[in-house]
Image (spheres, rainbow, N blue to C red):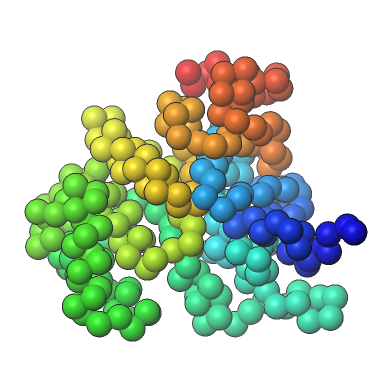
């Protein structure tokens, strides 16, 4: 007997992917940035999005947690349509409060650290768990201190962001996102704003996180990181997925001429 097909696109015998993008389209005015993107990210998988600036990588990432609304297609996260309720055959955008509740389970780390400058490192980490998850200060603090230790910043709990290097601030930002116990982590070029000598310390934290089985989608220009850590690399150009596959294939032996030209320019 054939497996029952579920609305999420999974089968009765296989779990739904953590992320599923189905024909995603996104425009800014007359500029179409995403032109029908199809992508799946399995649970525990690390996917790196690579490609030239303007190819749509960051926009796709922001569509996953509905920081950007889509004009076409559907985005599922953990089996649920992200940002919309299905009423009959039509999608209706959810109220802002409901979207925010869904975003709680999706951690995101941006190019810039976005730490609260008037709060200590520890206060930055426990603010959202206390206000959003309603955690007790004691439990939120214990988890925050444990995460700071895991990113090598146990001695910086009482420091303020201005007292930290860029690499340290980005590691704090990663720990802050993890404090919300996310199901998936999104990284939008997390090392692009760092001095070259600070990049390695952030990438190490990300490698360690990947080793724990966290589902991760990473927009990056760090080809060595993508080659070493990603389960799959997706090359995007001009709003399309041009090529995807294991890192050793896409980076080591690209099949598409556009992929080869891009890699020749960055490696």
Task: Name which quarter of the figure residue 47 lies in.
Answer: top right
Task: Name which quarter of the figure residue 92 lies in.
Answer: bottom right
Q: Which x, y percent locates residue 164?
A: 15, 49
Q: Which x, y percent locates residue 14?
A: 70, 56
In this picture, residue 129 sits left or right of residue 52: left
Q: Which x, y percent locates residue 67?
A: 54, 63
Q: Which residue is drawn at 58% across and 34% down?
A: 233
Count of marks, rendered view: 0
Location of the N terminus (image quadrant): bottom right
Q: Residue at x 19, y 47 (%)?
A: 152
Q: Which x, y percent locates residue 200?
A: 29, 33
Q: Judge whether 257 appears above or below 177 on screen.
A: above
In this picture, residue 123 sits left or right of residue 200: left
Task: Name which quarter of the figure residue 144 lies in.
Answer: bottom left
Q: Residue at x 74, y 55 (%)?
A: 22
Residue at the extreme front of the image, as rendered: 1
Q: Judge whether 230 appears above or below 45 on screen.
A: above
Residue at the extreme right of the image, as rendered: 1
Which one is nearer the viewer's eye here, 67 or 138?
138
Which one is nearer the viewer's eye here, 14 or 34?
14
Q: Can residue 191 be seen in this view?
A: no
């Amino acid at each position: 007997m054939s497996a029952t097909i579920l609305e999420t696109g999974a089968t009765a015998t296989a779990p739904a992917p953590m992320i599923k993008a189905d024909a995603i389209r996104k425009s800014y005015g007359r500029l179409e940035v995403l032109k029908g993107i199809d992508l799946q990210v399995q649970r525990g998988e690390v996917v790196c999005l690579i490609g030239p600036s303007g190819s749509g990588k960051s926009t796709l990432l922001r569509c996953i947690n509905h920081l950007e609304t889509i004009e076409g297609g559907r985005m599922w996260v953990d089996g649920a349509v992200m940002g919309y309720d299905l009423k009959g055959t039509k999608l209706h955008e959810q109220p802002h409060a409901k979207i925010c509740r869904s975003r709680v389970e999706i951690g995101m780390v941006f190019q810039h650290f976005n730490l609260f400058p008037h709060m200590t490192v520890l206060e930055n980490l426990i603010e959202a768990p206390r206000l959003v998850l309603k955690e007790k200060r004691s439990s939120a603090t214990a988890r925050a201190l444990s995460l700071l230790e895991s990113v090598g910043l146990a001695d910086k709990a009482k420091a303020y962001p201005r007292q930290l290097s860029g690499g340290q601030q980005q590691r704090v930002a990663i720990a802050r996102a993890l404090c919300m116990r996310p199901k998936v982590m999104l990284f939008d070029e997390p090392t692009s704003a760092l001095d070259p000598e600070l990049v390695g310390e952030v990438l190490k934290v990300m490698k360690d996180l990947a080793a724990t089985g966290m589902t991760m989608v990473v927009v990056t220009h760090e080809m060595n990181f993508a080659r070493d850590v990603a389960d799959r690399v997706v090359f995007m150009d001009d709003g399309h997925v041009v090529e995807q596959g294991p890192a050793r294939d896409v980076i080591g032996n690209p099949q598409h001429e556009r992929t080869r030209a891009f890699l020749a320019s960055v490696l």
